[in-house]
Amino acid sequence: MKLYHKKRIAAKLLKVGHNKVQLDPTKAEEIGNALTRRDVQGLINQKMIKVKPHSKHSRAKIKLTIKKKRKGRTQGTGSRKGSKNARQPTKTVWMKKIRRQREYLTILKKHKELNVTDYRTLRTKCKGGFFRSLRHLKLFIEEHGMKQKNGN
């Protein structure tokens, strides 16, 4: 006896796919006698027709990749989504760089290791993006002999 149509009706009533519908094999005769939707609904209420439990997805592989990412692996060019700016905005990079440079200059000025004119010129150079990093700024100061010792 073909129970495909009963299974299809039950799937519609239970709001699941027909593969998720489970018919009781011992009660196949009774299920076969059901003609209308109301009959099939009655069989569902009597637990002759059930919904199969949802299969759960394993998170083992995901947990492994998360562990690897924490170590700094699996983040090459192929697995990156979004632009370079989306991953690390150029504005925040600039802000961090300029704040570090300005802070360093103010410390030098406070300790009187830089005179006011040199401080001003270096600060404007920083603003113009002349220095690549704090290290570059320090090298520039050393090369041009701008740093004075102990306020002399």
Image: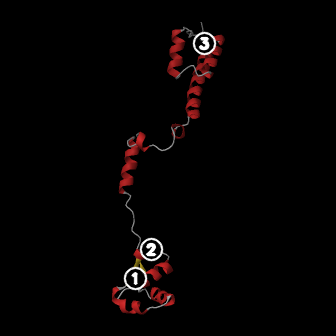
Which is nearer the eye, 84 or 109?
84
Which badge, 3 or 1, comes first in the chain's sequence?
Answer: 1
| Residue indicated by mark 3 | 114
Using the numbered discs, state the Cα–Cα distance from disc 1 to disc 2 in whole angstroms. Answer: 12 Å
SS class, disc 1: helix
In this rendering, would 66 be left or right of 84?
left
In this rendering, would 65 be left or right of 120?
left
Please tell me in which quadrant of the rendered image residue 141 appears.
Answer: top right
| Residue indicated by mark 2 | 17
Q: Position of residue 43 (x, y in %)?
A: 45, 88
Q: Is mark 1 in CB contact (under 8 Å) with mark 2?
A: no
Residue at horizontal 64%, vertical 18%? 124
Q: Of the residues tagged 3 and 1, which is closer to the observer?
A: 1
SS class, disc 2: loop
Which amino acid lies under the numbered mark 2 shown in the image of this protein?
Answer: Gly
SS class, disc 3: loop
